[in-house]
Image (tube, grey):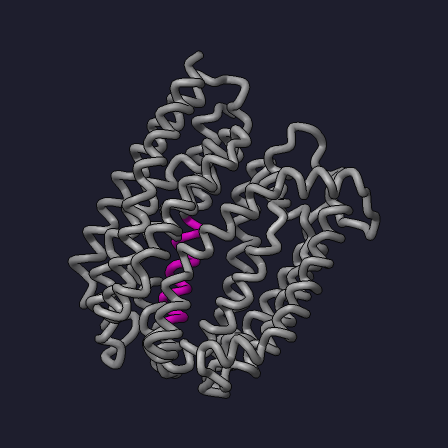
Amino acid sequence: MSFFKTTVDGLSWITFLRLSIRVLTFIRIAILARLLLPFEFGLFAIASLSLSFLEIVTETGINSILIQKKEDYTTYLDTAWIISILRGLIISVIILISTPWIASFFSSPSSAKLLYLVSWVAIIRGFVNPASVKFQKELFFKKEFFYRLTLILIEAVFVIIFAFMSRSAISLVYSLIISAVAEVFLSHIFIKPRPKLIFHKAKAAEIFNQGKWITGFGILDYIYTTGDNIVVGKILGQSALGIYQNAYKISTFPITELGDVFYKVTFPVYVKMRDFPERLKIAAIKGGLLLSVLLLIASLLIYFLADSLVSIVLGSNWLAAVPVVKTLAFLGFFRGTSNSFNSLFMALNMQKQVSLIILFNALGLAITIVPLVTKYGLVGAGYSAIIGASLSLFPALYLVRKTLSNLSK
């Protein structure tokens, strides 16, 4: 199969997957927005932000490293699994210890119970079979479609059931726990080989050495993608945080869908094209330009349809989200464009370049977020996110030009 045909096939399946997930997510949000108040979404956001922060800080980059490996990646699975289990335990312990401080920081004693519960998610996820990376590694996009869709369906069904029963944020955490259990079960039943509790010190050292830059840009990306949420929750409160998070989900789907699909497919394909630099250069240029055009079209649609999207998806009680959706509409274009060549950098083991681009994202947000939120409220958070994304375009374009030039030599 040619690289072009493989890419098109992968894009078809992953696009179908992301579209299916997006439809399910919108249905899920539409139902939950009518069952839960913004305050409940804000409580859950505090717990999920804490979990995702610790997952990023302790990220080893195992999946990306296994995809990059030219040699047999299965020899790393046992060690990768043990590292993943230990990582989950560490995250859980940190959440349990820091819960009083987190609840105090957000002035939200009600979030403590959710934080204690969400610590179990980290432990459970640690047992997922790392061999699931073979879907991308071997370009088995059709199999990944059914695997991921099954997991999202399980979470969606249970969160709606629990929300009907409890009418509280705890339903969101319970669904996360069940989804994590399902992923562990499915990954060991249907994905081979299954890992064993065997630890190889040399392979662990290699994973940590290669993964340090992945951890670095993961932390920077977390600051950029969630720093606004933290500031909104701290300054404006849980209800405002709930509104902002749902507005963010609606307005930034060009990133989470088009951008993620593009990266997920092109990264493993570019890895296989490394021995054909001229073909890789042409593919990267065409792919980057196509993604930017699609992102711009999607951003324009979201801006002009903001009122309708909020009314349909969230309902009349969430009209405060409309100006936020309009503000964030073009965030997808700026951020997606600056990240459009990340799959090329990662395929060439250029993790430092990705970190540098995300550093500009994070710096732009960090410098502007507090004053803009203080002055303009939720809309100010959107302004800050766009400033960060705009700044990152400059180093991104420079590094892309330099990299493409080197491919021609």
Question: Which residue is at the front of the view, 223 or 248?
Answer: 223
Residue extent of the magenta highlight: 16-29
Q: Quadrant of residue 383?
A: bottom left
Q: Which percent across, then down, holds residue 1?
A: 52, 25
**Residue under the image location 51 percent in, 62 percent down:** 152
As displayed, is residue 367 above or below residue 291? below
On the image, the x and y values in percent for residue 183 come to: 63, 60
Residue 220 at what x, y percent from top left?
Answer: 46, 51
Q: Within the image, what quadrant is residue 193 found in?
A: top right
At a point 39% along the width and 23% down the height, the residue shown is 402
Query: Where is 140 relative to 87, above or below?
Result: above
Residue 175 lies, in percent from the top left, at: 55, 73
- Image-based side of 193 in relation to 347, left or right: right
- Is 178 in front, or is 295? 295
User: In which quadrant will I find the C terminus?
Assistant: top left
Q: Say if 13 sits above or below 395 in the image.
A: below
Q: Residue furthest right?
A: 198
Q: Give the residue at x 37% y 61%.
A: 23
Q: Is residue 143 above or below residue 342?
A: below
**Does the magenta-highlighted stretch encompass residue 23?**
yes
Report the magenta stretch's main SS: helix
